[in-house]
Image (cartoon, rainbow, N blue to C red):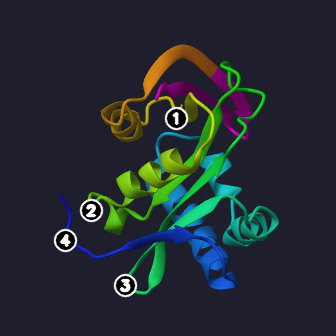
Amino acid sequence: MGIAMEFIIRESVTDQDKDGKAYVHYTAWNETYTGLMPQEFLDGRSLEKCIKNAYEYPKNTFVAVAEEKVVGFALYIPESRELVSIKPSSEVVAIYVLQKYQRNGIGEALLKQCIKVLPQNPIAIFVLKGNEKAINFYKKHGFKFIGKTVEQNVKGGTLVELEMVLER
């Protein structure tokens, strides 16, 4: 466990929330995916692109706030994307928590909040192959790998994501 910490989970509503989401997105990717994704691909990302993304897609986002700042977020969609193999279904698109704030129950609280509001059963999520920490986190919460992968060609290589599903 990390250091005991108070935090709240709430809908993302303010520009400060969007800016915080963008910072977490950018920083958590570097913390999480260095060594798991081609460095050339990671180097092509920028905080500015993450800010633009946060403002273009502000809906269906929960933020985790601790120490008066956004330290994590979850993005969900009630109707899953086409690449999800089981229909109808909902989808958790992303959960990221800054490394310093991990192991305090924040990721679990974000996931539970998404599960609570998502209307469709099952719920899908895609996890980067090799990201054992995330795979084990989702397994712990009842998600199962269903044998389907999705490949994406990116600068410097190919990303493989595992489709995991939670039946409620």
Choose the circle earlier in sequence order: 1 or 2: 2
Q: Does the magenta stretch include residue 119?
A: no
Q: Is residue 161 magenta?
A: yes
Which residue is under mark 3? Answer: 67
Which residue is under mark 4? Answer: 4
Q: Tell me which amino acid carries mark 3.
A: Glu
Which residue is under mark 1? Answer: 127
How many numbered discs? Answer: 4
Q: Tell me which amino acid carries mark 2.
A: Asn
Whether label 4 touches label 2, CB < 8 Å: yes
Whether label 4 touches label 3, CB < 8 Å: no
Element on which disc 2 rests: loop
Local crowd size for mark 1, using a 10 Å CA cut-off: few (<14), some (14–19), many (≥20): many
| Rendering coords of residue 52 (x, y %) | 78, 69
Choose the circle earlier in sequence order: 4 or 1: 4
Q: Tell me which amino acid carries mark 4.
A: Ala
